[in-house]
Image: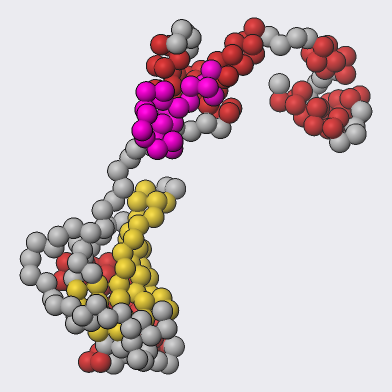
Amino acid sequence: MKVVQFIDMMRGRGCRVESVCRVLSDYGIQIAARTYRAFKARGPSRRDLQDAKILAAMVHLREDPDARGRKPRERFYGRRKMTALLNRKGFEVSERKVGRLMRLARMKGLRRGKEPVTTRPAGKPTAGDLLEREFTAGAPNRRWVTDLTYVKARTQGWCHTSFITDLFSCKIVAWHVDRDLSAQMVSDALVIALDNRRREGHPAERRGLVHHSDHGSNGGFNRSS
């Protein structure tokens, strides 16, 4: 089938079937021009017709008809639910066939996995808010704020990121990524920020710098320090 698709593509570029078959034979792929034409002259197979019928039903039924009142993007079915729905509608299909057709049509169900939580009560006394919710600064290296977020890596799963921003220039002076959300991650980002400013020729005076973080799960770095 892939060979036929390749010949179709080359024909679309203006190449003759005989020429394409001759080049393929040089690479060890034996197919005669008459074989290609005979294949193209055939009608669709029984499997192709069945797949087309099921695929049309999948496109029509890909939204849950019983999920009224929900957001449209929450009504998309995955492989297992789509298989069960098709069987209820009278189609005798397996998850394997449905999965193959969904990949062919690039249909994906909504994943309902839980997202990481970056804000939890600290559970112990924390430092006060030295900024008093005033997120401005009159000079560099006077007020830094930390923000925590998360990203999903392709191979490593969920990763947490700590950003430190100078409120005077709104410049990110440092960031640090870790698999675990902890006070150590925020502490490492702060050390990196201090080192970056020192190497840039603008060292921060530790007595004149306030490092602030909102209440969250980063332990002793809650609020200002």
Which residue is found at the position 37% from the left and 48% from the top? 157
Please say if 58 is above or below 172: above
Name the dominant secondary structure of the magenta segment.
loop
Specify whether residue 203 is in view.
no
Which residue is found at the position 40% from the left and 38% from the top? 71
In the rendered image, residue 67, in percent from the top left (x then y), is placed at 37, 28
- Number of numbered discs: 0
Please say if 181 is above or below 142: above
In the rendered image, residue 139, in percent from the top left (x then y), is placed at 36, 92
Residue 121 located left or right of residue 28: left
> Is residue 96 magenta-colored?
no
- Specify the color scheme: secondary structure
Residue 174 located left or right of residue 123: right
In the rendered image, residue 19, in percent from the top left (x then y), is placed at 91, 28
Residue 206 lies in what quarter of the image?
bottom left
Please say if 85 is above or below 115: above
Q: Read off the magenta span.
A: 57-78
Which residue is found at the position 36% from the left and 35% from the top? 70
In the rendered image, residue 135, in percent from the top left (x then y), is placed at 30, 79
Please say if 190 is above or below 42: below
Residue 3 located left or right of residue 201: right
Specify whether residue 73 is in view.
yes
State the residue in front, 198 or 151.
151
Quadrant into which the N terminus falls: top right
> Is residue 68 magenta-colored?
yes
State the residue in front, 181 or 108.
108
Residue 216 located left or right of residue 73: left
Residue 69 lies in what quarter of the image?
top left
Which residue is found at the position 24% from the left and 77% from the top? 133
